[in-house]
Amino acid sequence: GENVEQHPSTLSVQEGDSAVIKCTYSDSASNYFPWYKQELGKRPQLIIDIRSNVGEKKDQRIAVTLNKTAKHFSLHITETQPEDSAVYFCAAGGSTLGRLYFGRGTQLTVWP
Amino acid sequence: GAVVSQHPSRVICKSGTSVKIECRSLDFQATTMFWYRQFPKQSLMLMATSNEGSKATYEQGVEKDKFLINHASLTLSTLTVTSAHPEDSSFYICSARDPGVPDTGELFFGEGSRLTVL
């Protein structure tokens, strides 16, 4: 099956700084790459996703880039705020919509 | 967004007993649901794909006789941990996508169920 690697496992930034989380995947058939945010005690929620026919997607302070050749994708959060503090998971999926393989997660802490 | 509800949120059982966890889609019909297992400070590990009206598809390394999945209706999937042992203690979380929203792979997660096997 698919193997998704995610780095770093923890990330601390000052409020207002940018945060970058990187993921790689192994299965070239994967074509869907979402990012989920999980706050403490809550369920994961989708924050942004990208498909393999697109190299970059942006939604306000959040952007995702995809390099299909290298099989890696990244999450970029600009102007971070304390409420961005959470665990972020990258994932990869293929033809079966919803069948996702997740990275190990990144604990992001934004200090005020 | 779509709502997925899971029950129970916490369950404690004795070793050797079986435990059933329910996952319901409340405002949409889900022909497919997904069961994940999450270890402390670790990722969501896909266990199986639950298919309404047919057998579940298990991921490599997941024992189908240990983790029985039934998807008898379009709004309910159940995971039964059979003959549970302490190593089965974990956080189990289900998810589903809303087929009424085409071309999206977004998953909606349940609240999760914390299983503790004594």
Image: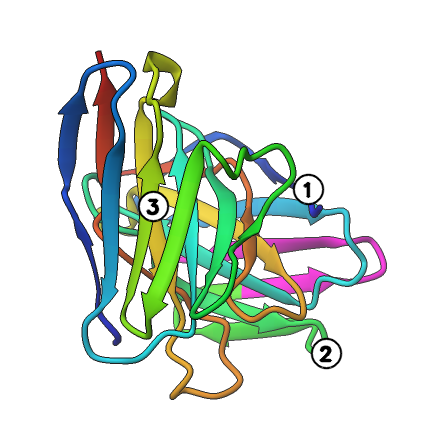
For discs 1 and 3, the disc positioned in front in the rendered view = 3
* Residue closest to the eye, A25 or A85: A25
Task: State whether residue B45 appears in this view.
Answer: yes
Q: Residues within 10 Å of mark 2 (few under 14, many from 20)?
A: few
Q: How many marks?
A: 3
Residue A53: assigned label = 2
The answer as to whether the residues below labels 1 and 2 share one chain is yes
Element marked by disc 2: loop
For discs 1 and 2, the disc positioned in front in the rendered view = 1
**Spot occupied by residue B33 in the image (x, y as percentages of width and height):** 41, 62
For discs 3 and 2, the disc positioned in front in the rendered view = 3
Q: CA distance from mark 3 to mark 2?
A: 36 Å
Whether residue B41 sits left or right of residue B10 in the image: it is: right
Q: Which residues are magenta?
A: A64-78
The answer as to whether the residues below labels 1 and 3 share one chain is no
Which quadrant holds the N terminus of chain B? bottom left
Element marked by disc 1: loop
* Residue closest to the eye, B85 or B93: B85
Write down the quadrant of residue A11 in the picture. top left
Q: Which chain contains the residue that carries disc 2? A: A
**Which residue is identified by label 3?**
B79
**Spot occupied by residue B96 in the image (x, y as percentages of width and height):** 38, 65
Q: Which chain contains the residue that carries disc 1? A: A
Residue A3: assigned label = 1
Q: Is residue A81 above or below residue A110?
A: below
- Among the two numbered marks 1 and 2 on one chain, the one whose residue lies closer to the N terminus: 1
